[in-house]
Amino acid sequence: MLSQNNKDSWKEIQEWLLSNNIEDVECIFPDLSGIARGKVIPSEKFLSGLKNNSLFIPYDTLTQMVTGHYPPTVEGRNLTRDLRMIPDAKTLRRSPWVKATKTGQIICDLYTFEYEEVNVSSRQILKNVIENYTKQGIRPVVAPEIEFFLVQKNLDPDYPLEPAKGLSGRYESGSQAYGIEALNEYVMFTDLLYNYCERSNLDVDTFLHEGGSAQLEVNFLHGSALDLADQIFLFKRTARQAALNQGMYLTFMAKPHINQPGSSMHLHQSLVDKHGQNIFSDPKKKYSEKFFHFIGGLQKYLPEASIIMYPNVNSYRRIRPDLDTPINVSWGFDNRTVGLRVPIAEPKATRVENRLPGSDVNPYLSFAVSLLAGFVGMEEKIACSKESSELSEQVDRTIPYHLYEALQIFEESKMLKKNLGENFVKLYKQVKNDEIEMFSDVVTTWEREHLLLIV
């Protein structure tokens, strides 16, 4: 039943499990929100299922909302329909936070019973975009930076979050961007997280303290888009577990605190040809035509994909220019206020930094739409605007104000339907629409405070 490639993969996985004395395996995949779904299976049963291609998951798992509910408006719901989970041997890693047993984790791709790719799964969406580049002899190289907040444990969701206390036992009172002493307040956490990442083969580069109270950032080493999306997906699990081990929560919410900066996931992007040469640079002109067309594609099409980069109701609370968040797709050299920044770098490191996405994104979909927009820009030879040396807030806003607006723009995008597939656009739209409807039923603290005794 196994192909030769699958036989080699099965042998590789078996040897790794045995050499590491792994007892249980977490078979996981990202849903539309980037949340890990799957099963925990004893190693022997996992190997048996892998050998027989009998690792199954309900199709409807892909359609779950961020709340865990199944959206009632998705057409063709069928809880009895299963998909095959085919593990990717390259993603096999330890789950070092699990104490009860020696546990491994592996990311699975999803296939139908007929072994057809499930093109609405977010990992497959990214693989399809990368394939567009491969056909042109080009390889995308990315380097993500992701921010998060450490907060006190919060057992009552109605109660505002408080920053986690550091070694001194005190709360941070103000902005400590790049503060070394502020970062050292959380050295017990960062040391543990480094340890977990090393044991999980996650290539984290540096930690720094960001501008919010107990807000940190992690930078990843550059590499292939699929590998880095996998690493961000796994890093979110790893970081949350490290924080729980230290008696605190870690959140990737885009805007967890009032009057504090939000958390972003910046994405550095470059393209290399089959010889490893950066195609954004040009010895004669410094920057190539493809470089400017890539930016032009980002400017034209990223607003249409806003709902991927700002996927939740909370995401839009982050888009405030007074808190260093871009509100448009203007671009500039070494301008950290615009949506698209070009760092000053030597030719081989020429890249475009997409500063729009929040840290709450599904990394696979966020990478996919950013790389897709740039690819189509090069295909259509889209001219970019003049580079901006102004502050972002001095340029008109082009990012939607809320999820409803983003949803409408997304649904009307011909480019996204053509390249991501109408089925994906329809499914994602239905899931997000039902999340909005659920949120609209909630009575908030603001309403109780300002309307209860007045109106």
Image (cartoon, rainbow, N blue to C red):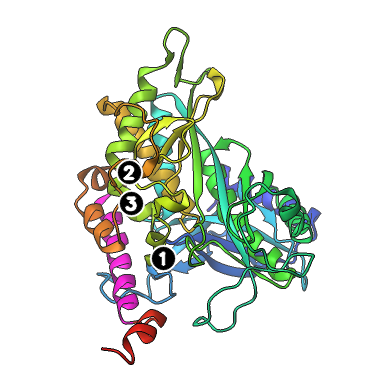
- Marks 3 and 2: in contact by CB < 8 Å? yes
The answer to whether residue 3 shows anywhere in this view is: no
Q: Is residue 138 magenta?
A: no
Q: CA distance from mark 3 to mark 1?
A: 13 Å
Residue depicted at 20% across the width and 45% down the height: 414
The C terminus lies in which quarter of the figure?
bottom left
293 up-or-down from 453: above or below:
above
Which residues are drawn in magenta? 421-441
Residue 302 got which mark? 2
Q: Is residue 424 left or right of residue 55?
A: left
Q: Secondary structure at mark 1?
A: helix
Q: Position of residue 420 (x, y in %)?
A: 31, 47
Front residue of 393/115: it is 393
Residue for badge 3: 306
Q: Amino acid at mark 2?
A: Leu
* Number of residues whose C-alpha sits closer than 10 Å to that of mark 1, classed few (under 14), some (14–19) or many (20 or more): some
Q: Amino acid at mark 1?
A: Asn
- Marks 2 and 1: in contact by CB < 8 Å? no
Front residue of 454/335: it is 454
Q: Is residue 253 left or right of residue 234?
A: left
Q: Position of residue 224 (x, y in %)?
A: 54, 37
146 up-or-down from 135: above or below:
below
318 up-or-down from 373: above or below:
below
Kindly indicate the quadrant of the structure image that contains residue 220. Answer: top right
Residue for badge 1: 314
Q: Amino acid at mark 3?
A: Ser
Q: Residue furthest top?
A: 284
